Image (tube, grey):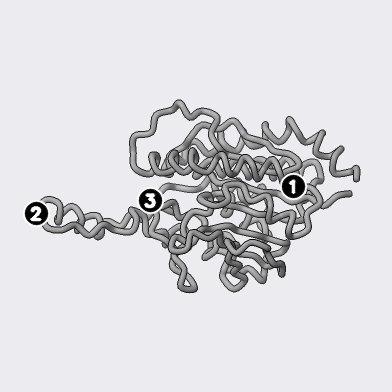
């Protein structure tokens, strides 16, 4: 049996689809040996590596309220508005959301575990805003050949996730080890290559790029996220072609960061997408 590496892509609340994917895999007795994640995929990857079962994940996300993870920097936004109204030079905040609530939520879900305490080989991807380099949080010992990657092995799972989910402008960057860390999707939207480097025989990529780009976006977070999706898709596509043995793309509509009512449908979409391919996956994992 070939070892399975599961790459979970970014996508905001669409990341709930990863929970449905894992539920189907477990239902068929297919247990990933390696897991990687970017942005929303990093949340699920970290929880899974910390020992959270897919059913527990579903229960947790179905209880979510937007206020559990959205903490607006009202003070910073108020100062900005005041400066604009009075005509004084404006100091723009680094992001609309502080990210502390989200980091705390992930810390609870992962029981405060550090990378070294993860139960299986894990990689979480972020981007250093200052150097433009890919940052990989991992519990594994490996080296990468390119000079465009920074490896971090000493951090909590929640710190790694907080860095990976930090959509520019929407979230304040995560400051860690002298780095200013933002959304991993800028460099690696679906982190497939790192799974091959870590030793996975077979890589399953879960791509949450929306199939329905025609839906208009009108708010700043939506515009930023859509811009990232468009910008990174070509590079991400090439990497998936080179390093993913199978790709699934759950049919999920774009959901805003606060639209928790969409989560049940998103989980079901993940299940549907995985069920359609699970027979082929089982066959391919059993053959060398």
* Residue at image mark 2: 86
* SS under mark 2: helix
Q: Residues within 10 Å of mark 1 (few under 14, many from 20)?
A: many
- Mark 1 → mark 3, Cα distance in angstroms: 31 Å
Q: Is residue 23 above or below residue 120?
A: above
Q: CA distance from mark 2 to mark 3?
A: 25 Å
Q: Nearer the viewer, residue 210 or 108?
A: 210
| Horizontal arrangement in the rendering, residue 253 relative to residue 222 (left or right) | right
The residue under label 3 is 170
Disc 2 or 3, which lies upstream in sequence?
A: 2
Q: Which image quadrant is residue 136 in? A: bottom right
Left or right for 103, reference 141: left
Residue position for label 1: 203
- Circle nearer the N terminus (1, 2): 2
Label 3 neighbour load within 10 Å: few <14, some 14-19, many 20+: many
Residue that appears at 55% across and 59% down: 134
Q: CA distance from mark 1 to mark 2?
A: 55 Å
Determine crowd level at label 2: few under 14, some 14-19, many 20+ residues with C-alpha closer than 10 A: few
Foreground residue, 178 or 221? 178
Task: Mark 1 and mark 2 in contact? Answer it, CB < 8 Å.
Answer: no
Note whether residue 108 is visible.
no
- Marks 2 and 3 in Cβ contact (< 8 Å): no
* Circle 1: element type: strand
Percent from the top left, x then y, of residue 60?
56, 50
Determine the residue positioned at 74% across, 60% down: 198
Q: Position of residue 122 (x, y in %)?
A: 67, 60
Give the residue at the far top of this rendering. 214
Q: Residue at x 38, y 51 (%)?
A: 170
Instruction: Measuring from the top left, give residue 65's x and y in whole percent.
Output: 44, 47
Number of numbered discs: 3
x, y percentage for residue 248? Answer: 68, 36
Question: Would you say residue 263 is visible in this rendering?
Answer: yes
């Amino acid at each position: 049996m070939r070892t399975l590496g599961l790459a979970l892509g970014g996508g905001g609340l669409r990341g709930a689809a990863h929970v449905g994917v894992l539920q189907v895999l477990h239902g068929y007795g297919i247990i990933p040996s390696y897991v990687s994640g970017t942005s929303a995929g990093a949340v699920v990857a970290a929880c899974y590596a910390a020992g959270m079962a897919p059913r527990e994940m579903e229960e947790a996300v179905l209880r979510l309220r937007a206020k559990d993870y959205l903490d607006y920097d009202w003070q910073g936004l108020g100062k900005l508005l005041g400066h604009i109204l009075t005509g004084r030079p404006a100091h723009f905040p680094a992001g609309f959301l502080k990210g502390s609530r989200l980091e705390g939520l992930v810390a609870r879900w992962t029981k405060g575990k550090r990378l070294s305490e993860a139960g299986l080989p894990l990689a979480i991807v972020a981007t250093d805003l200052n150097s433009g380099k890919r940052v990989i949080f991992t519990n594994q010992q490996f080296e990468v050949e390119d000079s465009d990657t920074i490896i971090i092995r000493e951090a909590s799972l929640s710190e790694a996730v907080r860095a990976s989910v930090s959509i520019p402008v929407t979230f304040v960057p995560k400051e860690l080890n002298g780095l200013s860390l933002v959304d991993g999707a800028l460099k690696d939207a679906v982190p497939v290559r790192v799974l091959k480097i870590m030793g996975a025989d077979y890589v399953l990529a879960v791509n949450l790029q929306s199939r329905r780009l025609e839906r208009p976006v009108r708010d700043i977070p939506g515009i930023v996220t859509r811009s990232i999706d468009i910008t990174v898709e070509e590079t991400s596509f090439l990497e998936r072609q080179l390093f993913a043995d199978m790709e699934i793309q759950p049919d999920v509509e774009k959901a805003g960061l606060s639209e928790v009512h969409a989560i049940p449908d998103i989980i079901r979409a993940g299940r549907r997408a995985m069920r359609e391919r699970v027979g082929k996956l089982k066959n391919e994992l059993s053959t060398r």
